[in-house]
Amino acid sequence: MKIAREPGPKFAAIKGYLVPWGCLAPALAFLALFTFWPLVSTLKLSFYQWNMVSPTPKWVGLTNYLEILRSREFWLAFWHTLEYTLILLALNLALPYITAYILSHLVFKGQNFYRALIFLPSVLSLAVAAVIFLWLYNPLAGPVNALLRLLGLPAPPWLSSYRWVIPALAVITAWKSFGYNFIVLLAGLVAVPLELIEAARLEKASNWQIFWRIVRPLTSGTALYVLVMTVIIGSQYVFVPIQMLTNGGPDQASTNLVFFIYQYTFNFFQTGKAAAAAVITLIIFGGLLFLQKRVLEKGVYYEN
Amino acid sequence: MKTKIPWWHFPLLLVVLGSLLPLIWMLATAWKTPEQVFNASLNPWPYPATAANFAYVMGAIPLGRYILNTFIIAFIVTAAKLLTSILAAYGFTQFSFRGRETLFYLCLLSIFVPFTVTMMPNYLFMSRMGWLNTYTGVALPQMADALGIFLLRQSIRSIPPSLVEAARLDRVGHGRILGRVLLPAIKPSLIALGILFFINTWNEYFWPLLMINDKSMYTLPLALQMFTNLEGGTNWGAMMAAATLASLPPVVAYLLAQRYVVDTFIHSGLKG
């Protein structure tokens, strides 16, 4: 403690501890109480069978885990989560990455204009995004299908089609999150020293080579952050259109792990299985974070 | 040196178009008559425009009440998050003690704890406390924010240390160092962060969905769900009018402070 080490009366020493901890206490208390304690609590619940109403949860050991790992619904939700995530990585990592590269290194005029408009959808509620797209996707009169018919293309019933429901819902989330990721990536990209790129230009490197060989390695820290957030937040975000528009349907074709956990908790009241599924997702995300750390340590260039 | 390739504006304009088209259709549909909605769904310009959809929304739901609910929750959460983040950022930057970095990274780790892992125990806690269907229930778990702590810590660190040291030598108390020296210096970040907190809380759907089932306590995003639940004869114009009304406050807040919000992200070093 900087202040406490100074020679002085005992009062100053106590005060030296009191002030910093007093500053940290409110934030730490809320995070401990509503983020970290529930984490432990969920872990505990996953070993019990309980319906949220009966007075005593019943200890069942690993039964919940074994049962969901044997259930078809869980694996459906698992593979769907993967599918959502892959689409979101393309639309919310690759696409904004390239867009931000174009804006920061190939186009110099109108930066404020582009930034302001591309960020705009990210200030809207996912609930708003969901209802807008519910209309856009309307099979009979919705603008998307009206346009497709005008062009003589097939016009599928997006949200009730087994084949299209996941891409259709992923696009809703992607539309809402694109601008945020774009701005975060842009922040990383503008920090790349221009001299490096000009030197490469003199060597007649193509724009793609400059992006892949120079800009991408120099901004990989930012990109990894966006990647991890897309995976973790993405599966949570996509819950909103699932819950509002399809309720997991048609016939569970659009469920994901977050929706699976929600249903088992609040529709089926099987907290043990829901908790077990939550712990499994946490383990998967934890593995991803660990991987990110490993990748970061292995030769990712840190900005600053 | 090769500069300014106008051709590259083309893909950027496509992205802008993709970002704006759904919004344009929301606005257009909100002002259309039912006939226009179905027969001219591709027309982005309702003519003649009608305000009937907005009138319908105001009659169908207690709009004023929902706006008030949403506003109160967003206001409480924003104020609390700013306060706890400022204090924590002060604690993390102005003192050195054992375990400081560990504690800071533990805070950051909370960003990566998925909502699914915390929602059930938090729901049970609120339910036991009798806080379902209350502002407390929605607001309480969100009163600290790791991203806020991170951004403000970053901003305070970018202030020249000589400023704070000069105040220390003058034996100025912590409250005044914070209030007179640090906070004025990081004002742009505070404004941006406050707006971001407000917008995010205003828009929230998942947690309020779990906390609130009493219709009089609904927030605007939850109220939208009522328009999708009408199977079959969905009133699309009214639904888009409700979506427009729910989006208005965040969009206005963003447009007023657009420079702050975007610049904070660009310059705060939210990287690595």
Image: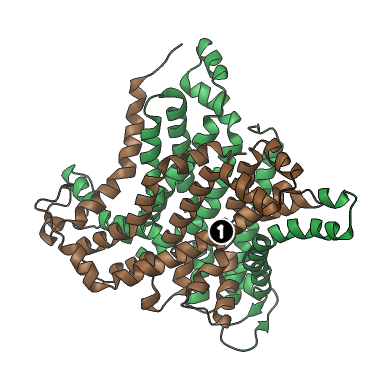
> Which amino acid does the dot numbered 1 rest on?
Lys
State how many labels appear: 1
Q: Whole-percent x and y of residue B81?
A: 56, 59
Residue B112, visible in the rendered structure: no
Of B173 and B156, nearer the camera is: B173
Label 1: state its secondary structure: helix
Query: Can you name the residue that lies furthest to the left here?
Result: B48
Of A169 and B72, nearer the camera is: B72
Q: Which residue lies at the image location 43% right of the left edge and 28% below the top edge?
A: A102
Q: Whole-percent x and y of residue A96?
A: 45, 38
Q: Which residue lies at the image location 46% right of the left edge and 62% below the top edge?
A: B75
Q: Which residue lies at the image location 51% right of the left edge and 41% below the top edge?
A: B264
Q: Is residue A107 above or below residue A133?
A: above
Query: Can you name the residue that lies furthest to the front here?
Result: B170
- What colour has chain A? green
Q: Quadrant of the C terminus of chain A?
A: top right
Question: Relative to B138, is A107 on the left or the right?
Answer: left
Q: Whole-percent x and y of residue B23?
A: 29, 49
Of B206 and B159, nearer the camera is: B159
Q: Which residue lies at the image location 23% right of the left edge and 57% below the top edge?
A: A139
Q: Quadrant of residue B115?
A: bottom right
Q: Which residue is mark 1?
A: B81
Q: Quadrant of residue B37?
A: bottom left
Disc 1 residue crowd, few under 14, some 14–19, many 20+, Cα 10 Å: many
Question: Relative to A142, is A298 on the left or the right?
Answer: right
Residue B242, visible in the rendered structure: yes
Of B94 and B39, nearer the camera is: B94
Q: Is residue B126 above or below residue B205?
A: below
Chain that bears disc 1: B
Question: Relative to B142, is B170 on the left or the right?
Answer: right
- What colour has chain B? brown
